[in-house]
Amino acid sequence: MRFRATHILLAVPLVAFLGLAAIFALRVTDGADRSVVPSALIGKSAPGSVFPGLGVGAGFDPAALAGRVSLVNVFASWCAPCRVEHPLLMDLGEEEGLTIVGINYKDKRASAERFLAELGNPYDAIGVDPDGRNAIEWGVYGVPETFIVGPDGTIRGKHVGPLSREALDGSFGDTLRGLLEANKGAAAS
Amino acid sequence: MSRLLAVVALVLLFAAGARAANPDEMLADPVLEERARELSKELRCLVCQNQSIDASDADLARDLRLLVRERIQSGDTDDEVLAYLTDRYGAFVRLKPPLTAETVVLWGAPFVVVVIALLAGGLYLRSRRRPDDASEAVPLSAEEEAALAALLAERKER
């Protein structure tokens, strides 16, 4: 029986392989999209730079979000998934106590106006970012992206890609509902 | 001949340009431009994700290349440029992740694996050596001796 130690050692690679395979299998099948880069800005203050307005509008000044629960949605008329999420934004526009702000990313003014005329305008304010430089401050790497900004001006959540019912039922929606609930309480008292 | 030389020189000139970032993005100062290029090679294009912004054709990669040059021109050090982008996009934006509490497992794993391999290999070799030791070999039993003799005799008959 003096070979026993060796036999256990021989099993080590197999056990290590099975362990790794189990970890990979769990990671592959958990349904999360690995191309989504988690935002480094969650828990930090929203960038302060002001976006000029679309047309005659006032634009988007992040300081104006203070005391309100807001969604900051990066969109463009040339972006197909933006059309997909648009009806959902229109619904959210009806939500009590929720401010929706649009950042019109690398777009032409006329195209953006046509997009909103055709599909409706869910935004309380719209800022433009024609060269995408300002969006870099927000860590934007594609459109659409949507941020949750709390009443204290802190970024609380981010959704990459078109907003969906699933996202609103998941942790993104939980964060939003939690903030709205807390803010309602604060406003009442 | 001089015309041929001129053509060769032109081709070489453009070939050199093709390896660099897009000409319209390049900084006039070659020292700063060189720093920008080295930094660009270390930064991940977040759209393509496995390409550096130096190698990528994506719009965002171009925006980030211009941003790197903008920061360098305004006097940022290399570390400050990397910090600027890491603050906005997270450590993922760096192709070579820095050693932090979060990445210590990633950086340490190869060394741990080497140590485990050496230990396992050493133990295995040590336990292998013993059976070869003649003094510990078990002598054949009388039965085995008889069987062996029979086999050898059979072979001789052929």
Image (cartoon, rainbow, N blue to C red):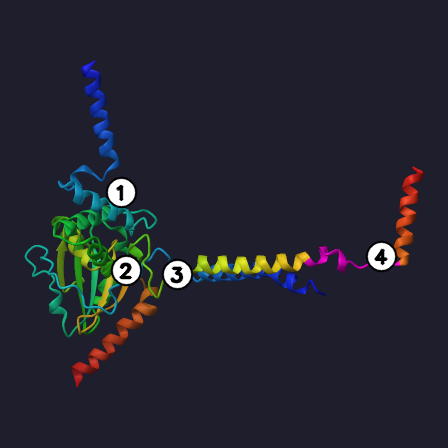
**Whether residue B44 is situated above or below residue B14 in the rendered picture:** below
Q: Residue furthest toward the left?
A: A56
Give the numbered dot on residue A32: 3
Q: Which residue is mark 2?
A: B90
Q: Is residue B6 magenta?
A: no
Q: Residue furthest toward the right?
A: B157
Could you say which is closer to the camera, residue A103 or residue B133? B133
Give residue A106's position: percent from left, percent from top: 17, 50
> Which type of secondary structure does the marked residue at label 2 adopt?
loop
Q: Quadrant of residue B98?
A: bottom left
Nearest to the eye among marks 1 and 3: give it.
1
Could you say which is closer to the camera, residue A44 or residue A152? A44
Give residue B10's position: percent from left, percent from top: 20, 25
Q: Which residue is mark 1?
A: B57
Q: Of the two numbered discs 4 and 1 on the same chain, state the one appearing first in sequence.
A: 1
Nearest to the eye among marks 4 and 1: give it.
4
Of the 4 image quadrants, the one containing the C terminus of chain B is top right
Residue name at image x 64 percent, y 61 percent: A6
Q: Chain of mark 2?
A: B
Q: Callout 1 environment at 10 Å: few (<14), some (14 to 19), or many (20+)?
A: some
Q: What is the magenta range?
A: B130-141
Three-letter amino acid code of the residue under disc 4: Leu
Co-location on one chain, circles 3 and 4: no
Q: Callout 3 environment at 10 Å: few (<14), some (14 to 19), or many (20+)?
A: few
Co-location on one chain, circles 2 and 1: yes
Q: Chain of mark 1?
A: B
Three-letter amino acid code of the residue under disc 2: Gly
Q: Which residue is mark 4?
A: B140
> Which type of secondary structure does the marked residue at label 3 adopt?
loop
